[in-house]
Amino acid sequence: MKFAHLSDIHLGFQKNEPLQKIEQQVFENAMEKCISLNVDFILIPGDMFHVNIPEMRVQKYAFAMFRKIHDAGIPVYVVYGSHDFSPVSNSVIDLLVETGYLTKVTRATSKEDGSISLEFIVDKNTGAKITGLSGLKVGKDVEWYEKLERTSLEDESGFKIFLFHGGIADMKTDSGMDGDQMPLSLLPKNFEYYAGGHMHKFNHQKFTDYEHVVYPGTPFAGYHQDLEENAKGQKRGLVLVEFEDKVKSVEFIELENTQYEIIEVDANNRRAESINSELVEKTKEIDAANKVVIIKVAGEMISGKTADVDISLIRDKLNDSGSLVVNIAKNQLKSKEYSITEAKGSNKEEVETNVIAENIGQLRFEQSILNGESGIKLAKRILEELSQGQLANEKKNDYIPRVRDSVLAILGVNKDDS
Amino acid sequence: MEDFQVVGQVVGGKFGDIVIRQKSGTNIEIGDLMVSEENGSFLILQVFALEYGSQIQDRMQQMMSGVNMEQGIVDASFYEPEFVNYVLARIKPLARVFKERGEVKIPKSLPSFFNKLRLISQDDLKFLQKEKDSIFVGHIRSGSKVIKEAEVWLPAEDIFSHHVLIPATTGRGKSNLVKTILWHVLDTNKVGALVLDAHDEYFGRVGIGLKDHLRSRENLVYYTPANPPVGANRLTINLQSVRPEHFEGIVDFSDAQFQAIRMAYRQHRKNWIRELMLTDAVQAGMESSSPSKSDFTAATMMVVQRKLRLLLSLEKDEEGVVYSRHEVFDSTTKGLTTVEDIVRDIESGKVVVLDTSRLGDEAELIVGNIIASKLLQKYKDAKASGEIDRKPVATIVIEEAPRVIGEDVLTSKNDNIYATIAKEGRKFKVGLTAITQLSSVIPRTILANMNTKIILGNEMKQEREAIIASASQDLSEDDKNIASLDKGEAIITSIFVPFAMPIKVPLFEDIVREKTKTESAQKTKVF
């Protein structure tokens, strides 16, 4: 007997058309793979979709695919993730559950004393007992797990699987991950397999009382960071598990997604000019055709503004040479001369004012209105204007010029000056 | 008629040793606090000695006793006994309180002669108002009487960055005090703490503990090596986090052994312990022609391996994977970020309790060392970049402190991180909370830097002397007083309190009962 375990597919995450195609392709390949591997069932513990109600394009192909899986007689067991979660069962997951394509495994009842008891779902073909909890923001998660009635879950006999969505602190391998982690001890013990979602890299570890805790990772990408990892050679795919009354094997099956090129520049102790010229040089060296190109500039420049590192030039070149998409990661680029420092405040307003006030001293402009007090006021007004949302019934073509014109007016700049 | 209950009257003495006559019918105890009212201010004084006084000569009295006992004259008694025989109390001034301004100053004058004294009351202690972000340690105690309304709160940031020493012998309420302090640290995020809990007694794995605090979910992090209770973290530290300098000042390695260790570190960097443990010592020593390995002999190598094996409880399984018996150290992929996670928690003002009860002495200190080094480095960096003000003060709670800041450790070996923190941590808002039975073996330079001492009972004269000699207030007359402190009674001496304050630390269990009103159970909504 065997099952497939996938997670964090994040359908609907990609905004660029070429990447959207890859996203769809990878998902369809993964499902086809499950059919061809002849699995008894599929587990997807969360973040199947990037939002609870994704756009129609995504829903269409997802439904088509799950129907195919359904017709092949393969049940799919799921819990909500942190992205596709809906407290009022208002997620496309629920739609798929209603049609019978998916089965939500969280059969929970909350008792008078606040405790939560979970029931098992028994897979008809294999007899595997499945249960689990959805993912939320972690603070809330912890509360659920603390209130879980464990004894009945831990004492239940048979081949038991627990689906969960959340980071486990005991399994972290790098510190760069977000701080939202929970200790493994929150999960009930003695399950044969813990099917995890939320962590985006394949990770399989064994602990006392927790025989197999597994994250398959995302099959393609759910954060921008994932594409960069892919470019650096991170393998993506699904997990295939063979079992009888115990787990016999846990195998990671790689799924191809696309080809990448990465241009990395270390900006430490350098100036914008030299960084720019290195970027141009490195662009010449690569063949970008039909590839996803990641440009990463990180480090602390010795002088100048981070905006002086100009990527637009090479982006155009790469586009001309037929790259699928050019992804730029500049968020780890800082400058000694000008670096944003955090600031405190009791509300958003105050924090904004303080951030601007603390940092404006690092800037020197010839136009006195941009410096000091007046600079702070100006920056705040622009920020305010830029945070105006699009009005109901307002078209994008009306919205953009409206905001642009009012910002230009605040700056006292004539539109035609540029 | 006075409008207060007189307990005595000033009859003589000198500054720092004033003699009062006790009013008959009252009961004065050692440690009692008294008040002498004067114009616009009052003096707080404390009893440090009691003796008899009498208007009749000693020899006369001895004869009286003879008449009484030997001749059996039963009704022999003094004429007006309360007038003739009495108790003299020797008292010292602690503080002068100016009523209007509420200011407290060190007294520099005597109370007026013949002035009548009364026992202290809660109204006299109004100046002890709780300030923002302070830590509760107990109630003011006058002798054995506790003044419940007078709570003593210490300014958290000041006292923790200037180090706290808790000298006490076993059974005097040391862990109760530490729990009480940590309980109030949990109230806010203004203090981050690393607690090396060698007896696993603070978290409350069984029974009441810090876990019962209402904010424990956000502010308390508990690490324990095996079988963590629900919600607790597994204490696993990857051997990659351990560096040679973490052994300095803790483990006794010879120069040659250290050289071997450093060589291994240079060669294998992060994996040095694993590689070193897997190296065949004999072969490594034999290949003396190979330049990288020629620096040490097979014997040195074997000693280093043996010491590391014992220290960290390392074993090798049949596949050549190095592991530790108590599961705290891991050579594979577990615990890679534990140290960083802990440091981050402390930096965000949480209390991190490490259950080190399964670790050996030295292994415990090494674990603490790894974390403390990283923590101090982070705070130093924050200082350099001007961000230190945004960080909470951090304290490292360590028991049996002489293990790391004792004279013998510090003179014979290099400084370790604890000594460094004791000496310079204050500048970087990192302090020690050192608990010890033996203050006398801590060097005076370090003792003097511990600017708050919460002194619990201690029978050992030598220890009392060391504490008194380094106290922030003059405790030269308090030797007897410290010796007679009962369980839970303490004296706080600190540069942050106006005078050496006698306190009674409440029972931790009572605090917990009082503060944790049972949350009304509510149905949890599950999706």
Image (cartoon, rainbow, N blue to C red):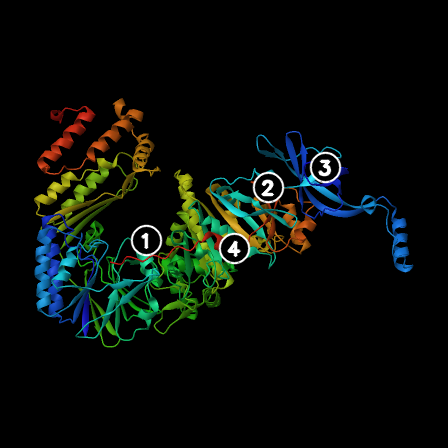
Q: Amino acid at mark 2?
A: Gln
Taking the view exactly as shown, the residue that stands out farthest to the bottom is: A245
Q: Amino acid at mark 3?
A: Lys
Horizontal side of B489 relative to B244 (left or right) equals right
Q: Which residue is mark 2?
A: B122
Horizontal side of A116 relative to B198 (left or right) equals left
Q: Give the percent coordinates (x, y) of residue A8.
A: 20, 57
Q: Amino acid at mark 1?
A: Gly
Subunit that carries the residue with mark 2: B
Disc nearest the viewer among 4 and 1: 4
Q: Nearer the viewer, residue B60 or B287?
A: B60
* Quarter of the image where one finds residue B352: bottom left
Horizontal side of B262 relative to B139 (left or right) equals left
Horizontal side of B70 relative to B296 (left or right) equals right
Q: Is residue A294 visible?
A: yes
Mark positioned earlier in the residue sequence (3 or 2): 3
Check residue B510 in the rendering and tell me which mark sits there, or answer none: 4
Q: Are marks 3 and 2 in contact (CB under 8 Å)?
A: no
